[in-house]
Image (cartoon, helix red, strand yellow):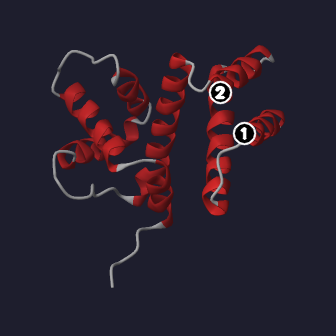
Amino acid sequence: MAKSRPKQLQLLDAFFSEADLRRLGTAWRRHREGFPPNPQDDHLVDLMRQHEDLKADWDALMMSEGGKGRLKIPARLAGPLFRILMEATLKESLAANKPPWITRLYDDLTLKGLKEVDALAALMWALAKERMRSKRTRTRVRPKNVEALARRWAKE
């Protein structure tokens, strides 16, 4: 019987593919090897640098990203990886204005005085909660639910 992955890693698996995780490893490897910044992945490296205490872990991820099998990710990295990938995904969505309702919600939260980092955190939390609900009920993500959750988070 196969050993199940820790809950932290199961959450990471529920939201992101192996390719998403390998993209992080590739971005970090390119940064460490001194390649010129790639505009698509430069923000990933910036987010990873915010966790300097995990530099050795990023280096280990870099070493395993070229392999064929599943990445060997320590459970303690699940939180930072989840945050980095969610924030990167949100920033890419905002830059592309896809879907437009996320951009409108983000703009509304920041216009009401929320700092950028707090607006992103509210959106990340709300999207994660709604995504878990939609997976559990096998229904679509509902923008109205995300909006209500983000506004509730912003008030707390």
Label 2: which secondary element = helix
Amino acid tagged 1? Val
Residue under the image location 76 percent in, 42 percent down:
145
Image quadrant where one finds the C terminus: top right
> As shown in the figure, which amino acid type bears the numbered disc 2?
Ile
Q: Which residue lies furthest to the bottom in this view?
A: 1
Residue 2 place in picture, x, y as percent? 33, 79
Q: In this view, does 150 lie above or below 41?
A: below
Residue 117: % across, % down: 62, 26
Residue at point 66%, 34% (across, down) = 123
Classify 72 as above or below 35: below
Q: How crowded is mark 1: few (under 14 residues within 10 Å), some or many (20 or more)?
A: many
The reply to whether discs 2 and 1 touch (Cβ–Cβ < 8 Å) is yes
Q: Earlier in the sequence, mark 2 or mark 1?
A: 2
| Vertical relation: 114 (above or below) 60 | above
Q: How far from the left and from the top, in percent, is residue 58?
A: 30, 42
Q: Nearer the viewer, residue 72 or 18?
A: 18
Q: Quadrant of residue 68?
A: bottom left
- Residue 32's tag is none
> Mark 1 falls on what kind of element?
helix
Nearer to the camera, 71 or 144: 144
Q: How crowded is mark 2: few (under 14 residues within 10 Å), some or many (20 or more)?
A: some
Task: Count all numbered tags in the image, as a single digit.
Answer: 2
> Alpha carbon of mark 2 to alpha carbon of mark 1: how far?
9 Å
- Image-based side of 22 in relation to 104, left or right: left
Residue 72's place in the image compared with 34, above or below, is: below
> Can you name the residue that lies furthest to the front here?
139
Q: Label 2 belongs to which residue? A: 102
Left or right position of 15 against 108: left
Q: What residue is at 60 percent from the left and 57 percent from the top? A: 135
The quadrant in which the N terminus is found is bottom left
Q: Mark 1 points at which residue?
A: 146
